[in-house]
Image (cartoon, grey):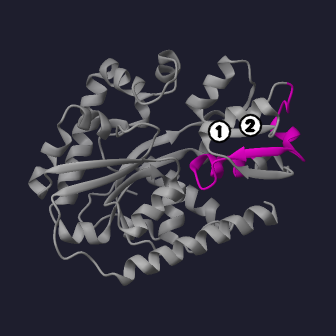
Amino acid sequence: MSARVRKTLKIATAVLALLLSAACGGGASTTASPTLRIGYIGTTANLTGALGYLHSKGELVKALSGAGITTIETHNFANGPDLNQALAGGSLDVGIYGDTPALVARGAGQPTRLLGQAGVDLDAAIVTKAGGPASPAELAGRTVAVAKGSYMHRYLLGALQDAQVKPAQILNIPTADTPGALAGGQIDAAALPITNAEVLRAKGLPIIDTLVRDHPNYAGTSVEVATESFLSDHPAFLGAWQSAHSAAVEQAKSNWPDYLAFAHTLAAFPPEIIDATTPQSQLDAEPFTRHGLDLLAGTQQFLLDAGLQAKAVDIDGWIASGTRKPAP
């Protein structure tokens, strides 16, 4: 990894630490609010995933009513680091996002607790410009882009490490801006979520590497976290949330065509590509599975080895107290 990338990530970690310090200095809330503020990664105002599916039917707030929740606000973010800042600043109660930014934040001291894993085996791919590199080995000396701090970032660094190559630079470009950068020749390749990558492949751009096919141990997971202060103010929330998680996945899997129709509303992509890149196996009714936790531990080890995570996180201790954990 280049010194420039390390410097950028260290600056981001320092900024997050300052935000955490300011947030903690204000003290925990003393009044339980009936409004739940959820942050997630997405491009629309609709909550994503199985819980988003439940919410679209008006059933999520009902499932959480026993914990005193009467209203839900949803807030979409372009990337995990931005969501981390909102959690640290006190404008969110719950975050649903990639494991990489969640671990980086927790390693920097962010006071969150794991509620569950919203998805496992999240896939990604490396796409190149037309006539560009034909394999990961040919990324040496090239300009590559990724949304830094995302699970795609972790995958990209791992793929480069496996190929034993170093690009000239890794630029931090939001996923939405990547197609223009590839078309304009500003970058030679980019790591993208699998759905975005397949959309570009349908337009003639090559995919030279995929996460789940070529590097399954780097597969990403999506986690659900809550701030410690919110859980303290709402002691019944954990049980209600995890029950809602299970109900959401069961409803999604038992009504899969309807779930996919919901997924079609979350992004302006061809429905057939969304269907092909949305496997049921990514969802599990249990908040945590051994496979999901193993992937989470693998992500952490990679981040620590790469110097991207400030401090190791005790994952079992990070899981909210009272959660039934899968057997080792």
Question: Foreground: 126 or 291?
Answer: 126
Residue 284 placed where, x, y %? 35, 39
Say above or below: 231 vs 325: below
**Magenta stretch contains residue 150:** yes
Residue at (52, 23) in percent of width and height: 269
Residue pictured at 56% horizontal, 61% vertical: 300
- Which kind of residue does numbered mark 2 sit on? Ala
The residue depicted at 24 percent of the width and 38 percent of the height is 55
Checking the image for residue 181, the label placed there is: 2
Left or right: 60 with respect to 137? left
Q: Residue furthest right?
A: 141
Quadrant the C terminus occupies: bottom left
Whether the magenta-drawn stretch holds residue 321 is answered as no
Toward the viewer: 234 or 135? 234
The magenta stretch spans which residues?
Answer: 131-159
Q: Compared to 159, does 182 lie above or below?
A: above
Counting from the top left corner in percent of width and height, residue 272 is at 50, 15
The answer to which image quadrant residue 209 occupies is: top right
Q: Tell me where residue 282 sits by quadrant.
A: top left
Counting other residues with Cα less than 10 Å from the Cα at mark 2, is it few (<14), some (14-19), or many (20 or more)? Answer: some
| Residue 44 sits above or below residue 308 on the image | above
Instruction: Identify the disc placed on residue 282.
Output: none
- What number is the disc on residue 177? 1
Give the quarter of the figure containing the N terminus. bottom right
Q: Is residue 128 visible?
A: no
Mark 1 surroundings: few (<14), some (14-19) or many (≥20) residues within 10 A: few
Q: CA distance from mark 2 to mark 1?
A: 7 Å
Is 151 placed above or below 130 here? below
* Disc 2 element: helix
Does the rendering let one see residue 49? yes
Q: In what element is the residue under mark 1?
A: helix
Q: Are marks 2 and 1 in contact (CB under 8 Å)?
A: yes
